[in-house]
Every structure is written in structure tokens, then in C-alpha cells.
Amino acid sequence: MNGLLKFITCGSVDDGKSTLIGHILYDSKLLYADQEETLELDSKVGSRNGAIDYSLLLDGLMAEREQGITIDVAYRYFTTNNRSFIVADTPGHEEYTRNMAVGASFADLAVILVDASQGVLVQTRRHARICKLMGIRYFVFAVNKMDLVDYNKEVFDKIQIQINELKDELSLENVKIIPLSATEGDNVTVKSNNITWYDGEPLLEYLEKVDIESANDEEGFYMPVQRVCRPDHTFRGFQGQIEAGNVSVGDEIITLPSTQKANVKSIFVTDKEVETAFSGQPVTITLDKEVDVSRGCVLVKGTNLAPYKKLTVSLLWMDDEPLSVGKDYFVKLGTKTILGVVTKLNYAVDVNTGKHIKTDKLGKNGIAVCEILLSEAIVADLFAFHKTLGELILIDRLTFMTSACGVVENLSERGGSFSGRTAFRSNNLEARGDVFEEFYYDCSSLNVLKYQSVNHTYTVGDEIPTNGDSYSYPDNFDIIVLRDGIAVEIRDKKVYSLVPLSDYKYSGHPLLNGRGFEIKAYSDSEIADFINEYTQIDDQSKKAFFSKWMCFETYRKVVMNK
């Protein structure tokens, strides 16, 4: 049996999407007896003069039946002798384009229906473009209602030319075109006797055979961290779903954005310990040393993934309020949610022609390419290379409604490695120091943004800049870098030493954390409590921990952006 196929049906209003899937379920004997009986009874009062109306199997809401259209995404799970399927039947009306995009975001293949009596319409082009935007690589154009054009080959040939033109325009991959009649069953589950000029397989047979696995290969292993599991002080596991590749006990992995290296100590799939885990499995991974990892971080092996602060994205706008430059949103990418500002709207896309349109606003169901500046660098990649780290949504900060979905087209302002960020190094000890970050209030976006203005690695004897636009430190202080387990001692504005935290003794000088915030600990015992509490925190207790131990304004401030 072939692997699970997740596909979507879409097209214009009344193109027969629900009827098509209903006919597959009915012909394949995939209904319970009571479902079949109910369908036959409901059809007697329907619009087909007593003949079976297969669309009723999916149009489950009374409001939809009254209108004769599907307005929500209806999911159906079914299995044939050759394959298991999940299908999303999506609305065709332009008003519900965002609903259709939700269905497309989960699918590997799109079945786009084209009415044989009308040909390729505006909605056909819109849906093909959105499916392409959502990363779908396999397309079936089902030229439906061939019975209404007397199964005329010339009509099909003309529509086939239109579809091929659309294929070239959007650079669609793996396109299959099938003439059929969802109502009469021609070429749905079995070959049609009415379309003898078509020598290909019927729709269901094609869906059972199509191989979509080969198109989903991504470089290396990566797992966005969903949760840090700390049942007690002896166990610290990183939980998430492996999105690509595999990982084994003993493998060296890199944690991003911290770029720390560690070896895999153990792997759990549910409550069972395993030696190797693979793409698609939810796992808990433990490492052989403490590393700086929390929700939103990514564990990687054999990839060139890195954190970035500026993204160029293609967006489908879903909000009733138009998109405007300068507004900030929550950006959710992978398992990370972070503040971001739309700094530029490069152009909108005409869904009919593909033409780029200069504009400073984008309305509902519009598509555009935009620039987004994030409040800090996060792990991201182009959608074409690593799908999970290349797809995102924008969330309104006030209503928490999803405003847009989109994919990453370009990346800039890379950060997150020792070579690219301020750090301290001495012998075999390394500590990241974000004490030189600048905090600016951006007047155009009305947000506080962080910039890394200094890119240098300091070692013992080097003088450091103790004054910047938004920070001012004393001549003598100590930095406790919790994520690296290192203390950096500064004397007379110079790096005096780097020592492991286990060897550090309180000197009486001011204490700062790795970001330049004052640590409110004034003795060895208080420092020990501070470090111990840090090892216990999770996502829920972070706020209380930082409120108790940190003070932002002692050595830092926020200044107006120049």
C-alpha cells in the first residue's frame, strides 16, 4: 500500500467539488449502511429529481445545503485497498479564499476542478496560485461536467491549452489533466465508456498511484522545539516533531540560535526509548550537556540553517482590515512566536495576470510580497528548502486573529553564530555576550527594536565599549552568561578572565546577565539560588523568574531611533 495522501479539492462555485468526493466515497463502498440510506433519502428532496446527490456527503451544515454551496472546509478520511487519504473539500467563492488557503496548507496535492462549459476562470487561477504559494507541488486539473458538453474532445482540448498556459505562468510541477463527470461517475473511480478518446487512468486510480514522497526531501535533520520537558531536576528533554532527516543516540547536533554543540544522550518516542528516530515522529531528545534551548529553538544536524532578522515573504492577506506598512504583528514561524513589523510592501500580485502592482495597502484575499523586520533573529529558511521553517502566519496583536499566511522568499540580516555576534573567548571557554545590543524606539512602527551594533570577539586583555546609545556600564563588573555556564570578569573596562560558573566566586562588583540587565544577587548564596532557579524554569515560569532576579533599567534604556 502507498503512503498517506493528503489532498485538497478546490475550484469555482458549483464546479462539483463535493459531488466528486462524494462519488468516490459512494463508488468505493466506503459508506456505512445508515449513511448510504440517509444519502438516498436526502437526495429525494434535493435538486436532482430523486437521483443521488453525492455532494450531500460532504456538505454537512444545514446553512450550506440551503445555499447550495460549501462555505467551510470539510475534511474526510477514507481508505481504499491501495492507499489512505485525507481530503479537504474547500469553498469556491472568492469571499472564502482564506478558508481554501487553510485547506491548502496541509495538502500534498491539489485537485482543481474546471467546469467544462466555462473553462479556466478567475477563481481557477486564484486557487492554483494559492496552492502554489502554500507549497503544493502536485496538481490534478479535473475538467468536470463533460456530460454537459456531450463529452466533446474539442472542448476538452481547448481547456487543456488554457491549463497548460496557467502551468507555464505559475511554474507548476507535476500537472495531470483528467476529463470527467462527477455527477455521472465518468473517469471518477473507473474508466468512462463515454470518453473513449482519453487514454489515461481515472482520478481515483491516479491518486492511489501518485508518488509524492520524493518531492518532500529536505536537507539534513531538524526539529523545532515545541516544549522543554522538566519533570524533575534530573531530566531535561526537548520535545517536538522531526521535520526532516533522522537522528540517533550519539549524534552531534547544533542548537539554534545559540549555535551550541552537544551529543544526543537519549531519544524517546512516547514512553519508549529508541536508538534512532525519523522524519514525522514526535520525540523527546536529551543531550549530554546543558545547552541554551527553549520553545522556538531548533535542533539541527547536517544543515546550513541559521537565524535571520529580516524576511521577504509572499503573503495571502486574510484580515478584513487591510495590511498597511508600519503595523506590527505577532509572527509565528515554526514553534516560535515573535513580534515583527511590516516595513515595506514591495508589490501586490494580480491573480488574473500575475502582474506586479505597486501599492501601499493590501485588502482581504490579496497576495503581495512584503518585507518583515523581526524584533530579534529567529531560525528561518526559504520555503523551498525547509518547509516548516519557511511558512508563517501573522497574528493581530489586539484581536489575536490570523491576519495573513505566507512563505519566506528571501532572508537577510543573519545572526546567531560566534563569528557573527559579540562574544568572549579565552582558551577553550566561550561565552556569548549580548551586552552590546542597542534598544531603539522606532518612530515609524511605534515599536522597540534591537540591533547588534558591535560584531567582535573579545579575549583576556581586550578593552570593551562600556558606553553605547542605549547602555552604560561601570568600569568593573561581572557578566554571568547562564546559557553557556560562564562568568566573564571585567576590570578597568578590560576582559580580566573567563571562568566556569562552577568556579565563580562573588567579587562584590555589579552583576549583569548576558544581555546587560542587572542581576539582583549580592552574595554567593544568592547567586547559587539564582543559577538553581534558572535550571528549573520553563515557558510558564520565565516571567516570574526574570521579574524576581533582573532589572532592565539599571544600565540600559530605550532611545529614539536615529
Image (spheres, grey):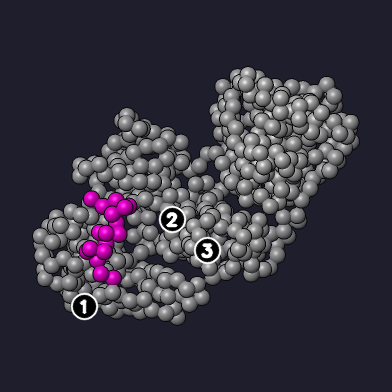
Q: Is residue 447 left or right of residue 215?
A: left
- The answer to which quarter of the image holds residue 173 is top right
Q: Is residue 23 left or right of residue 262?
A: right
Residue at mark 1: 474
Residue 368 place in picture, x, y as percent:
63, 60
Q: Which mark is residue 337?
A: 2
Dot 1 and dot 3 residues touching (CB under 8 Å):
no
Q: Is residue 474 left or right of residue 275?
A: left
Q: Amino acid at mark 1?
A: Pro
Dot 3 and dot 2 residues touching (CB under 8 Å):
no
SS of the residue at dot 2? strand
Range covered by the magenta-colored residues: 536-552
Q: For residue 16: magenta?
A: no
Residue 399 visible somewhere in the drawing: yes
Q: Quadrant of the N terminus?
A: top right
SS of the residue at dot 1? loop
Who's the residue at 35% across and 79% down the image? 469
Which is in the foreground here, disc 1 or disc 3? 3
49 and 489: which one is in front? 49
Residue 545 place in picture, x, y as percent:
25, 59
Q: Amino acid at mark 3?
A: Ile
